[in-house]
Amino acid sequence: MDGELRALAESQAAICSVFANPRRVLIIWTLAEQEKSVSEIAATVGLSLQNTSQHLHLMKEKGVLDSRRDAQTIYYRIAENELAKSCPLLIRAHQAKATI
């Protein structure tokens, strides 16, 4: 296997590891409709602000989320890039289960 293929496999494995944590999947579901502040996300998924911030930081670092600052509030949303294309699959799976 050549180096490019190995690098691609490592990149995809890193992204998949983000979704291996159920709290991060809950965060993705929370952000399915619109961006939210850290405190809104924490309240929705039932985590502390500190724990939520750690998950959000990792997800942003991996390219799954983007953020913006408005004064003192940071808002997160699902990134619009190649790395985050698997997020809609998670969201659809959640929505399908909710309608059953």
Image: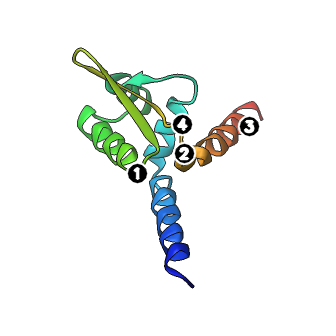
User: Which quadrant of the figure has residue 43?
Assistant: top left
Q: Which residue is mark 4?
A: 80
Find the distance from the CA under tag 4 to the CA under tag 2: 7 Å
- Viewer-nearest of discs 3 and 1: 1
Q: Residue at x 48, y 56 (%)?
A: 15
**Crowd around label 1: few <14 · some 14–19 · many ≥20 (10 Å):** some
Instruction: Give yes or no for contact between labels 4 and 2 (Cβ–Cβ under 8 Å).
Output: yes
Residue 2 vs 78, above or below: the answer is below
Q: Which residue is mark 1?
A: 62
Residue 71 vs 89, above or below: the answer is above
Which mark, residue 84? 2
Task: Please name the amino acid that badge 4 sits on.
Answer: Glu
Q: Earlier in the sequence, mark 4 or mark 1?
A: 1
Instruction: Give yes or no for contact between labels 2 and 3 (Cβ–Cβ under 8 Å).
Output: no
Q: Residue at x 57, y 24 (%)?
A: 33
Q: Which residue is mark 3?
A: 96
Task: Please name the amino acid that badge 2 sits on.
Answer: Ala
Find the distance from the CA under tag 1 to the CA under tag 2: 9 Å
Task: Please name the amino acid that badge 3 sits on.
Answer: Ala
Which mark, residue 18? none
**Crowd around label 3: few <14 · some 14–19 · many ≥20 (10 Å):** few
Q: Nearer the viewer, residue 64 or 42?
A: 64
Q: Earlier in the sequence, mark 3 or mark 1?
A: 1
- Secondary structure beneath disc 3? helix
- Viewer-nearest of discs 4 and 2: 4
Looking at the figure, which quarter contains the C terminus? top right
Looking at the figure, which quarter contains the N terminus? bottom right
Instruction: Give yes or no for contact between labels 1 and 2 (Cβ–Cβ under 8 Å).
Output: no
- Viewer-nearest of discs 4 and 1: 4
